[in-house]
Image: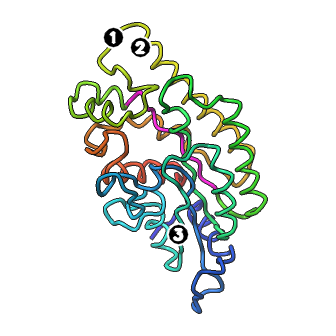
Amino acid sequence: MNIPRRTLTLIAAVILVSAPATAVADTSSAAIGTMASMGDSITRGFNACGFYLDCPSRSWSTGSSSAVNSHYRRLRADSLSLVAYNDGRTGAKVADMAGQAQQAVSQGAGYVTILIGANDACTSSESGMTSVADFEARFRTAMQTLTTGLPAAEIFVSSIPDIKRLWEVGKDSSSARAAWATLGICRSMLANPRSTGQADADRRERVRTRVTEFNAVLAGVCAEQATCRYDGGAVFGYPFALSQLSPWDYFHPNASGQQVLAEVTYNAVFAV
């Protein structure tokens, strides 16, 4: 099998990092490689296997499901002792990244994935969105925790999905509109979904702009670290379809959406 050079480099880094104290020793290798995922409900696989519950087995990053074929499953093909921790939390914002980074450090992760920011833009109103300055300060703090505590770890940072795309693919679906209204989902973007008024159009564009500004922060802070790789906007640019969203809320990825997310992000980080 022809393994890309970057894959070999990452696998080597994963194997060389010491295993956490809770891991079971593997006498066939000097150390057990570990990976950790940081993020929000998307990384937790929320609504990907049932109504309003986390489904970490279907996480794009650390999931064990063959239907998703996560980063964990792909890397495990070349490192059978790989241990995965899902440190994400449903509802998390960038303010929660410092704590999750500390968890990843305590787990001795050799590979860390980060997908955060949707909840900083998807709020009950436009005024509730996280400021760009606060987003940058908090994300930089989390990255410093990771790079100081795990200097040899490879870090992958995903761009935030284009939440305006959600509005575009769901606004003409009565089921999607009903779910958004009933559950109060991402009202900063999804309020008045059928409105063509200028005020609503301008609001949607401002929220989308905030997401692009967050993504610029993710790219810039990641670029400051030699061990960090950003996806280049691959997730933001991917045209997700309505069929790839959970029928429970028409917001979170279903198993198919998680699979696509795994594919897009893996290709971004391990591109030859």
**Segment colored magenta:** 155-165
Q: Which residue is mark 1?
A: 196
Q: Tell me the amino acid under the disc marked 2.
A: Asp
Task: Identify the residue at horizontal 73%, vertical 64% (top origin).
Answer: 152
Q: Report the Cα–Cα distance between label 3 and label 1.
A: 45 Å
Residue 212 at x, y = what percent?
56, 29
Label 3: element kind? strand
User: Which residue type carries mark 1?
Assistant: Thr
User: Where is residue 252 shown, x and y percent of the image?
Assistant: 37, 44
Q: Image height check: is 176 above or below 202?
A: below
State the image coordinates of residue 31 (x, y, percent, origin top left). 64, 82
- The residue to which callout 2 is attached is 200
Q: Is residue 239 above or below residue 70?
A: above
Crowding near the residue tagged with mark 1, few <14, some 14–19, many ≥20 C-alpha atoms within 10 Å: few
Give the quadrant of residue 59. bottom left
| Label at residue 84 | 3
Q: Marks 2 and 1: in contact by CB < 8 Å?
A: yes
Q: Residue furthest bottom?
A: 27
